């Protein structure tokens, strides 16, 4: 929106002055997808990671062994993931045409 105006801040008089420029009447496109999203909280996600133990995790006897050993340990990473769902769809919008529905996550 602001690119359509020349903006002047008049600090002493506490004013904002907007003057139209050549882009003032160019087409304005807003929310072409037709989707309105809404934050619904967070989920705690537990992900299993295959962890390969290196020399720091081996005992003294295992370090001295010249044979090849790979130690796999189950490691889990916990992270929060935001839940965002569709709260509104504009009729005839590209999102509605592809089959999205309100309350889809």
Image: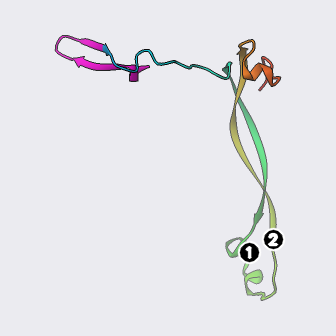
Q: Secondary structure at mark 2?
A: loop
| CB atoms of marks 2 and 1 within 8 Å | yes
Crowd around label 2: few <14 · some 14–19 · many ≥20 (10 Å): few
Going from N to C along the chain, the mark reached first, 2 or 1, is 1
Residue at point 68% right, 37% down? 80
Residue 92 is situated, as x and y percent measured from the top left of the image, at: 75, 14
Residue 36 is situated, as x and y percent measured from the top left of the image, at: 66, 18
Residue at point 72% right, 44% down? 78
Residue holding disc 1: 58
Residue at point 71% right, 70% down? 57
Q: Quadrant of residue 35?
A: top right
Q: Is residue 18 above or below residue 48?
A: above
The C terminus: image quadrant? top right
Calculate the distance from the C-alpha at mark 2 to the C-alpha at mark 1.
Answer: 9 Å
Viewer-proximal residue, 98 or 20?
A: 20
Magenta range: 1-18
- Give the farthest residue toward the left: 12
Residue holding disc 2: 71
Reply yes or no: does residue 3 show up in magenta: yes
The N terminus: image quadrant? top left
Viewer-proximal residue, 75 or 22?
A: 22
Q: Is residue 10 above or below residue 59?
A: above
């Amino acid at each position: 929106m602001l690119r359509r105006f020349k903006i002047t801040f008049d600090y002493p008089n506490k004013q904002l002055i907007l003057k139209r420029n050549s882009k003032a009447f160019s087409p304005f496109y807003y929310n072409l997808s037709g989707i309105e999203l809404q934050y619904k909280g967070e989920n705690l996600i537990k992900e299993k990671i295959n962890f390969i133990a290196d020399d720091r995790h081996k005992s003294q006897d295992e370090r001295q062994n010249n044979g090849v050993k790979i130690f796999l340990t189950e490691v889990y990473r916990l992270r929060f993931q935001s839940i965002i769902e569709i709260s509104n769809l504009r009729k005839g919008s590209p999102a509605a045409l592809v089959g999205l529905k309100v309350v889809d996550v």
